[in-house]
Amino acid sequence: MTRITSIEALRALYPAPRERSLNKVLLALDHHCRHFIGLSPLMMLATYGTDGRADVTPRGDAAGFVRIFDAQTLLVPDRPGNNRLDSLTNILGNPAVGLLFLIPGIDETLRVNGTAEIRTDPNLLDAGMAEGRRPVTMLRITVQEAYLHCAKAFMRSKAWDAEHFVPRDSLPSMGEMLRDQLGLATAETQTEMLERYKATLY
């Protein structure tokens, strides 16, 4: 097994990128980016902590839940989760973030890179209202790069093709897996877990 340790060795294995791939990076959100974000109900948030560890977490809500303040500013409400605060803790130490926007049924994705700050401004929290509840905090993202990502990964994975969906019972429930991983005496059932989630979505 050979470990690649230099850019030169890595580049020698791959063709040069197409000029279009290099030139597609935008420094602000154009109308296509805005339209894409407005249709997206799901976004992956990547952060990087001062301890050197990377983290990626999903963020989702009704399409358009990520608000576009202007061409270089996005607002992301922080909905209730597990309260580990991994992403938010990382942002406090290192504001660099990467966002990947997905639209169910669309194989292309939108990548946005920039910096984030955690805000509690009342007007921003009001903008993130959902189901009558304000988020505790709001991420204010300053966009530095935005570009469309090709469809190949989703074409290969057939992620949106219902014929390739994996039946839920192919995997133990999360409660069962946590029971085994943590050595718990009992496991929360799938039904119990879903009911708990529904009660705490917002």
Image (tube, rainbow, N blue to C red):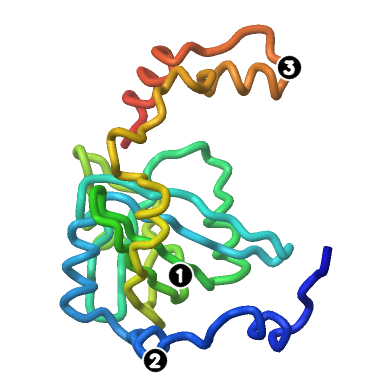
144 relative to 190, above or below: below
What residue appears at the point 83 percent right and 63 percent down from the top-left corner?
A: 1
Q: Read off the residue under disc 2.
A: 19
Task: For marks 2 and 1, give the CA distance.
Answer: 30 Å
Whole-percent x, y for residue 30 in the image: 21, 81
Q: Nearer the viewer, residue 101 or 123?
A: 101
**Crowdedness near tag 1: few (<14), some (14–19) or many (≥20) residues, C-alpha within 10 Å:** many
Q: Relative to 161, is 152 on the left or the right?
A: right
Q: Read off the residue under disc 3.
A: 183
Task: Tell me the element at label 3.
Answer: loop
186 relative to 65, above or below: above
Q: Nearer the viewer, residue 37 or 2?
A: 2
What residue appears at the point 36 percent right and 33 percent down from the top-left corner?
A: 165
Q: Quadrant of the C terminus?
A: top left
Residue 154 visible, this angle? yes
What residue appears at the point 82 percent right and 68 percent down from the top-left corner?
A: 2
Residue 126 visible, this angle? no
Q: Earlier in the sequence, mark 2 or mark 1?
A: 2
Check disc 3 and give the amino acid type. Gly
Check disc 1 and give the amino acid type. Ala
Whole-percent x, y for residue 161 in the image: 29, 41
Q: Earlier in the sequence, mark 3 or mark 1?
A: 1
Q: Relative to 7, is 116 on the left or the right?
A: left
- Cβ–Cβ under 8 Å for marks 3 and 1: no
Q: Which mark is residue 116?
A: 1
Task: For marks 3 and 2, give the CA distance.
Answer: 53 Å
Task: Tell me the element at label 1.
Answer: strand
Whole-percent x, y for residue 131 in the image: 20, 38
Task: Tell me the element at label 2.
Answer: helix
Q: Nearer the viewer, mark 3 or mark 1?
A: 3
